[in-house]
């Protein structure tokens, strides 16, 4: 294995747009893990909720948002944790605003949950969005060697908040754990992007 911080150039066209989303140069094993894991987790979550379909009494729109979020967050956890995504999203030139903006736009997820599934519970939105933005800012400003333990500490705090102070959303008890795992831990924490020796990208040193 080797460590390479220099990603290959994204491919042209639609393939390039995909590269910019998951990181260019993903290995077949990474792609397989992402697709199998994402579809598998989404299917399991859907089956769990189908078993309580009558109790939930969701509209078509609620089911569509549920499937979209299950797919997005499941895939986001796996994809953002890959070496290829770490190399791409933490490449040279990425600034505070780039990472903060990526996280901040996910406030739409929280807003839709508050609106569609919690009857306009905007306190839910304000609390979790505030925790998300504050946690993001702190992690980004923390020295590299402390980012991972701090992110896990903050993530553990959201689990306590979700189970003790704010009741989980019916049918979406997994949402807050998946949401914060994707953003605070999988995305924000830089990790050494180990690559197979067969990778064509030449290894370079990166100072921390």
Image (cartoon, grey):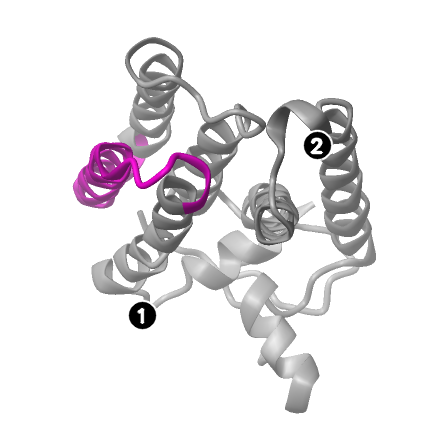
- 10 Å crowding of disc 1: few (<14), some (14-19), many (20+): few
Q: Which of 193 and 98 is in front in this view?
A: 98
Residue lying furthest top:
164
Please indicate, yes or no, whether residue 5 appears anywhere in the rendered image.
Answer: no
Q: Does the magenta stretch include residue 102?
A: no
Label 1 sits on a secondary structure element that is: loop
Q: Is residue 92 above or below residue 13?
A: above
The residue that disc 1 covers is: 93
Q: Give the range drawn in magenta.
A: 116-145
Residue at 29%, 26% (x, y): give it: 150
Report x, y in % for residue 14.
67, 85
Q: Nearer the viewer, residue 47 or 19?
A: 47
In this rendering, would 191 be left or right of 188? right
Residue lying furthest bottom:
13
Report x, y in % for residue 25.
67, 67
Report x, y in % for residue 107.
33, 51
Q: State the quadrant of the N terminus.
A: top right
Q: Is residue 189 above or below residue 162?
A: below
Please indicate, yes or no, whether residue 53 appears anywhere in the rendered image.
Answer: yes
Identify the mark nearer the N-term, 2 or 1: 2
Q: Is residue 142 magenta?
A: yes
């Amino acid at each position: 294995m080797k460590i390479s911080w220099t990603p290959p150039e994204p491919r042209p066209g639609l393939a390039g747009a995909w590269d910019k989303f998951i990181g260019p140069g993903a290995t077949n094993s990474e792609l397989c893990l992402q697709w199998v894991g994402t579809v598998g987790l989404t299917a399991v979550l859907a089956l769990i909720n189908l078993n309580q379909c009558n109790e939930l009494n969701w509209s078509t729109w609620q089911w569509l948002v549920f499937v979209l979020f299950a797919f997005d967050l499941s895939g986001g956890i796996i994809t953002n944790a890959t070496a290829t995504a770490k190399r791409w999203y933490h490449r040279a030139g990425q600034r505070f605003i780039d990472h903060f903006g990526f996280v901040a736009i996910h406030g739409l997820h929280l807003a839709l949950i508050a609106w569609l599934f919690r009857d306009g519970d905007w306190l839910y939105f304000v609390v979790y969005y505030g925790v998300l933005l504050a946690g993001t800012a702190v992690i980004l400003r923390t020295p590299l060697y402390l980012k991972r333990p701090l992110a896990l500490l903050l993530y553990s705090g959201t689990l306590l908040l979700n189970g003790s102070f704010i009741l989980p959303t019916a049918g979406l008890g997994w949402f807050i754990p998946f949401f914060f795992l994707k953003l605070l831990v999988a995305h924000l924490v830089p990790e050494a992007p180990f690559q197979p020796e067969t990778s064509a990208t030449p290894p370079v040193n990166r100072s921390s």
